[in-house]
Image: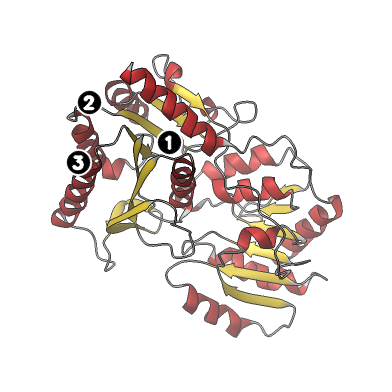
C-alpha cells in the first residue's frame, strides 16, 4: 500500500511530530509512505525510516494564523503559495498513493484551504481513486462561527472517506471540542493516541531528579521560561530549561544572562527529551498533544501551563481533562507567578508518579490497520 501524508505546522512542531510518528508506523508495517511537509524544518525530530518531502515552508506570524510568512520571514505572496501547491500536487501524482491523509485539514488550516483542496482534487482525479482520510488530535480549536463547522462538514462529506481521531473515546470524544454533524459521525474512527513507543531510561541519566521545563519545538513559551528561572530559586530541586524555535540559541543566551545559578541548566531542545522524562522529578510544560502523551506514558508529575495566546483554547481543554488524574496541576498564564509555579511543582512531586498502565497509546498502529481495511474495501 502506498500512502501520502500531508502536514503543515505553522507554530510549534507538534503536528509534524505526530505525522512523522504515523508515517513511521506505516513504514514499519511494510508500506510505502511519503510525508510531505509544508512547515519550517524541525531538526530535533527524527525523519528517518520513510520518504520525507519538504516544500517551500510557511510559518504563522506568531498566533496570527491568517498571516503566513515565507522562508525569509516575509508575508508569502501568491506566487510562493502557488509554488507550494504545485509541488504537493506533483508529489501526489508521482506517488499515486492508495491512501491520502491530510493532517488537521479540513478541521483547521483554513488559510491553506486552496492548496489542500488542490491536492484533494488531484487525488480524486486519480484512477483508481485513493482513500482520503483526515488525521486529527484528541481536542481541536472549536470553530468560532457555525459557518466554519458547516464548511468542514461539506468538505468531509464530499471529498473524504473517513476521519482518524487520535484519541481514546473513553477519555475524550471529538464532540467535546467540535460539533459533529449526523452525517459526519459515521466517518469517525477512534484510533487511540498516536505516540512513539514509551521511552527507555536515559542511558547517561540526563535529567535525573530534575524539573524539566519545556515548551515544544517552536519559538513560544518565553513567559514560561522567564517565570521558571525565578521559580527555580524557590525550589530545592535542580531545574533544566529546554528552549525551542529557530531563534533558540539566541534565546538561551539571553536567559543565561539573567541567572547565574549552578542548579539551573538552560539549553536548546534535545532529541533525547523523552528519555530524560523517565528519570526526571517533574515537568513544567505547555499542554500540546505530543507533550501530553509523553507525560501520560511516563507518569511524570506535571505542572501544565496551557498555551492560550491569541485566544487559543485547545491546550486549556486538554489540560483540564488531564487534571482529573493524580500528579497533574494546571496553572493558567494569568495565574503563573514564580511562587505559584514553585508551589505547584512541590505539590505534584509530593503525589508521586502515576501508573501509565492501560493507556491507549497504540494509535499509530491502529491508524495503519484502519487505513489498510478502508483501502481493501475500496478495492473489493
Local secondary structure at mark 1: strand
Q: Residue at x 81, y 59 (%)?
A: 346
Q: Quadrant of the N terminus?
A: top left
Q: Is residue 288 visible?
A: no
Closer to viewer: mark 3 or mark 1:
3
Circle 3 sits on which residue?
A: 93
Which residue is more in the foreground, 45 or 170? Answer: 45
From mark 3 to mark 1, how far is it between C-alphas? 21 Å
From mark 2 to mark 3, how far is it between C-alphas? 12 Å
- 1 or 2: tag closer to the N-terminus: 2
Q: Is residue 149 visible?
A: yes
x then y, percent, for residue 103: 39, 41
- The colouring scheme, among rainbow, by chain, secondary structure or one colour, is secondary structure
Circle 2 sits on which residue?
A: 128
Residue 365 vs 341, above or below: the answer is above
Residue 228 vs 332, above or below: the answer is below
- 3 or 1: tag closer to the N-terminus: 3
Residue 83 vs 97, above or below: the answer is below
- 2 or 3: tag closer to the N-terminus: 3
Circle 1 sits on which residue?
A: 135
x then y, percent, for residue 287: 59, 49
Q: Local crowd at mark 3 within 10 Å, few (<14), some, or many (≥20)?
A: some
Local secondary structure at mark 3: helix
Q: Quadrant of the C terminus?
A: top left
Q: Residue at x 25, y 42 (%)?
A: 95
Amino acid at each position: 500500500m502506498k500512502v501520502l501524508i500531508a502536514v503543515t505546522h505553522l507554530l510549534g512542531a507538534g503536528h509534524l511530530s505526530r505525522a512523522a510518528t504515523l508515517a513511521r508506523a506505516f513504514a514499519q508495517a511494510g508500506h510505502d509512505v511519503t510525508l510531505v511537509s509544508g512547515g519550517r524544518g524541525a531538526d530535533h525530530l527524527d525523519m528517518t525510516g520513510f520518504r520525507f518531502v519538504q516544500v517551500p515552508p510557511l510559518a504563522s506570524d506568531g498566533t496570527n494564523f491568517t498571516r503566513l510568512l515565507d522562508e525569509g520571514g516575509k508575508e508569502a505572496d501568491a506566487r510562493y503559495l502557488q509554488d507550494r501547491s504545485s509541488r504537493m500536487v506533483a508529489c501526489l501524482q508521482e506517488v499515486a498513493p492508495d491512501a491520502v491523509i491530510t493532517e488537521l485539514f479540513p478541521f483547521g488550516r483554513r488559510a491553506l484551504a486552496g492548496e489542500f483542496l488542490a491536492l484533494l482534487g488531484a487525488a480524486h482525479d486519480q484512477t483508481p481513486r485513493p482513500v482520503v482520510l483526515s488525521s486529527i488530535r484528541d481536542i481541536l480549536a472549536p470553530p468560532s462561527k457555525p459557518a466554519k463547522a458547516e464548511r468542514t462538514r461539506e468538505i468531509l462529506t464530499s471529498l473524504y472517506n473517513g476521519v482518524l481521531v487520535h484519541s481514546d473515546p473513553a477519555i475524550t470524544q471529538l464532540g467535546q471540542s467540535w460539533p459533529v454533524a449526523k452525517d459526519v459521525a459515521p466517518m469517525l474512527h477512534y484510533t487511540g493516541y498516536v505516540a512513539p513507543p514509551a521511552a527507555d531510561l536515559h542511558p547517561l541519566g540526563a535529567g535525573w531528579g530534575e524539573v524539566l521545563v519545556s515548551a515544544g519545538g517552536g519559538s513560544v513559551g518565553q513567559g514560561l521560561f522567564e517565570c521558571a528561572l525565578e521559580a527555580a530559586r524557590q525550589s530545592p530541586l535542580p531545574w533544566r530549561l529546554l528552549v525551542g524555535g529557530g531563534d533558540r540559541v539566541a534565546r538561551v543566551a539571553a536567559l543565561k544572562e539573567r541567572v547565574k545559578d549552578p542548579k539551573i541548566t538552560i539549553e536548546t531542545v534535545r532529541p533525547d527529551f523523552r528519555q530524560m522524562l523517565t528519570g526526571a522529578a517533574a515537568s513544567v510544560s505547555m499542554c500540546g498533544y505530543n507533550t501530553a502523551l509523553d507525560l501520560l506514558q511516563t507518569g511524570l508529575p506535571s505542572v501544565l501551563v496551557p498555551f492560550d495566546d491569541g485566544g487559543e483554547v485547545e491546550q486549556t481543554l486538554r489540560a483540564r481533562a488531564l487534571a482529573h488524574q493524580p500528579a497533574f496541576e494546571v496553572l493558567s498564564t494569568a495565574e503563573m507567578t514564580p511562587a505559584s509555579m514553585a508551589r505547584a511543582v512541590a505539590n505534584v512531586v509530593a503525589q508521586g508518579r502515576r501508573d501509565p498502565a492501560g493507556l491507549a497509546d497504540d494509535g499509530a498502529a491502529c491508524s495503519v490497520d484502519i487505513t489498510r481495511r478502508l483501502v481493501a474495501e475500496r478495492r473489493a
